[in-house]
Image (spheres, rainbow, N blue to C red):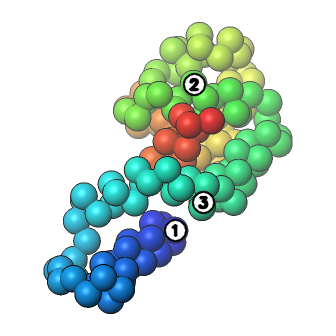
């Protein structure tokens, strides 16, 4: 959020103060999309993304595999589909999911598991 906010304000300041152009002091969905679709955005946020990814390499095995499987599914997938895609047994899968959930990386809603932070999900897809 800090990076997103910083980039939004930076773009606004450039547009208004550097280019001398006028615009409303309200950010739109298009402004947010322009920031996150900038090819440099995920490079600028690499410390956060690398930190979450690195944390998933420690502790319960299979955390990174779970994240990779979940990334293409913004709405999430079922526990059965996750088990099938990762090839993990139920005990190891549940332990890894519990660790990821405790670290606010994934969540379970109405029987579907998904990555909680959309920007992290998008970063994983680019890896």
The residue carrying mark 2 is 69
Q: How many marks?
A: 3
Instruction: Point out residue 83 in the picture as x, y percentages from the top left corner.
Output: 60, 16
* Contact, mark 1 vs mark 3 (Cβ under 8 Å): yes
- State which mark lies toward you, 2 or 1: 1
Q: CA distance from mark 1 to mark 3?
A: 7 Å
The residue that appears at 70% across and 33% down in the rendered structure is 64
Sequence order check, earlier mark of 2 and 1:
1
Sequence order check, earlier mark of 2 and 3:
3
The residue that appears at 47% across and 28% down in the rendered structure is 72
The residue that appears at 77% across and 47% down in the rendered structure is 54
SS for callout 1: helix
The residue carrying mark 3 is 45
SS for callout 3: loop
Would residue 58 be found to the left or right of residue 105 on screen? right
Sequence order check, earlier mark of 1 and 3:
1
């Amino acid at each position: 959020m800090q990076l997103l906010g910083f980039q939004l304000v930076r773009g606004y300041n450039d547009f208004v103060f550097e280019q001398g152009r006028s615009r409303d002091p309200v950010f739109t969905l298009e402004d947010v999309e322009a920031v996150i679709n900038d090819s440099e955005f995920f490079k600028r946020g690499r410390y956060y993304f690398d930190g979450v990814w690195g944390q998933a390499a420690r502790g319960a095995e299979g955390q990174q595999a779970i994240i990779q499987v979940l990334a293409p599914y913004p709405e999430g997938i079922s526990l059965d589909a996750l088990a099938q895609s990762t090839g993990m047994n139920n005990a190891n899968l549940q332990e890894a999911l519990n660790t990821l959930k405790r670290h606010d990386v994934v969540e379970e809603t109405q029987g579907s598991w998904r990555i909680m932070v959309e920007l992290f999900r998008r970063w994983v897809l680019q890896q």
